[in-house]
Every structure is written in structure tokens, then in C-alpha cells.
Image (tube, rainbow, N blue to C red):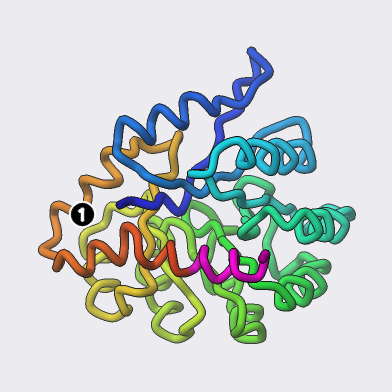
Amino acid sequence: MIIDFHSHIKRNIKENRFEIEELLEDMKKNHVDKRCVSAIDGPSIREQNEYVKNIVLEHDNLFAFAVINPKEENSIKELEYIIDSNIFYGIEFNGFYHGYNPESCEFLDDIFNMISKTKLIVKIFTGICANGVPQQWTRWIKQYNNIKFVMLHMGCFDYGYSCVDLAMDYKNVYLETSNQYEVQIFNKAFQNIEAERILFGSQYPNKFTKNSISLFDYFNLDKNVLNKIFFENANKLLNEVRQEKL
């Protein structure tokens, strides 16, 4: 089985719709059983999160993740909405897309304090830009060691090695594999990080799901390790959140 831990529901601006059917077809074509979804584009963050909340109720193979922009004044209210909905499995932060350095966001202390009282998973965009440095989040990773931080894209090419270093230093840091194609960075991760803290992701629709899956053919990984990366690890994290919802 395959759980895709990171994907977005594309927003078609011209047609004024989210392309959910295309996402589901991609899952079927690539034998992805379940998928974690969020919406990074839309009229507003509330409307994006509202759409994700509603669409997962129609599809039991999708897990809802919300987006928050911590530099916005209403970010605390948005988090309250996310928690109260009891639908979302985690929160996604993207300093690259929303244009912020986490160290300059005054609401983050309150945000992480609220998240720490839940089982919600935190996804962090890493790589590409100055706002994608993994170590910028160290303060909260260290302070809130009960929160599971998933570093999306393993730092990409720019910060891949240091992203693995961060996971080596903190056991509550997990690595997600989409948009990471550097063999040496993967080898460093496989050699130094427990397989239980590596999660498969596709970054659909920005990347081809097939390529994200086929990437692992280049590594001589044990079948049990592959099963953990593609399914077991994500399933365990999601189940921990699900138990809190019951």
C-alpha cells in the first residue's frame, strides 16, 4: 500500500474550481491508496481550508491538512477553526509561498503552544529560498518536542544535508521525500535516520507522482524499509491523530 503524505489540490483559476477529480485519477493511475491533501491556492486561506475540510468528508481515502500563514493577524482564529473542526490531521507552513521568515512571525509562539495541546502534525516547507532554511524552525522543534515536525522536501537541493542534520539532532523531526532527487542526500538520510522517520510524498500536482515513486528504485532498500517509508510510518502518524478525534 502507498500513502502519499504530501500533495496539494490544484486550483484552476480560469474555471474557478479545485481539481479534485484530477487528483483522484492520479491516485488511481499510480496505485496510491491514500493521500494527505491541502490547498495552497485559493481566494483566501479560510476558503482553501474550508474546501479541503468538506472534500475529505466525501472521500475516505483523503486526509485533510490545513494551511496557515503565521504572519496574518487572523492566524490564531484560523487555527482555532482548524482545531474545532476536528477534521484536519495537521498544519502546513510555507514560508516560501507566503513570504515570511518564521523567526519574524510574532504569532508562532502562540500557534505552537495551541498545537502542542493536540496531536496535530506540523508540516514545514524546506528548500529553494532563504525562507526555506530548516534550522529556522529549530527553536520550536526544541521547545515543543511533543509535536511531530515533518520537513517537506528534505530541504530540496539547497538545504538537504542540513535538513538531515536537523533530523539527526531531534527525534521529533521527520523527513518527507518529495522534490528531493539528490542521491547523496538520500544516502545520508538512509544511513543516519531511522526508517521510521522517513515519509513518502509526491508533491502532486507540481511533480509527477510516478517519478516520486520510481525514485526509490535507485536505492537498494529492504522491502520492510520501503513498506515503512511508503505506508507504515504515515499510517502510524495519522492513526495517532485519529485516536484523538474519537
* Occupied quadrant, residue 204: top left
Front position in the image: 77 or 129: 77
Main secondary-structure element of the magenta-colored stretch? helix
* Occupied quadrant, residue 234: bottom left
Front position in the image: 167 or 84: 84
Front position in the image: 72 or 34: 34
Q: Residue at position x 44%, y 44% from top?
A: 203
Q: Is residue 39 left or right of residue 44?
A: left
Q: Which residue is mark 1?
A: 216
Q: Residue at position x 39%, y 78% from top?
A: 165
Up-down: is 110 above or below 99? Answer: below
Bin the neighbour count of mark 1 within 10 Å (Cα to Cα): few under 14, some 14-19, many 20 and up.
Answer: some
- Residue 195: x and y, percent? 30, 74
Residue type indicated by callout 1: Phe
Up-down: is 19 above or below 203? Answer: above
**80 in magenta:** no
Count how many numbered circles sit on residues in the image.
1
Q: Residue at position x 31%, y 30% from top?
A: 29
SS under mark 1: helix
Please give the range of residues in magenta. Answer: 237-246
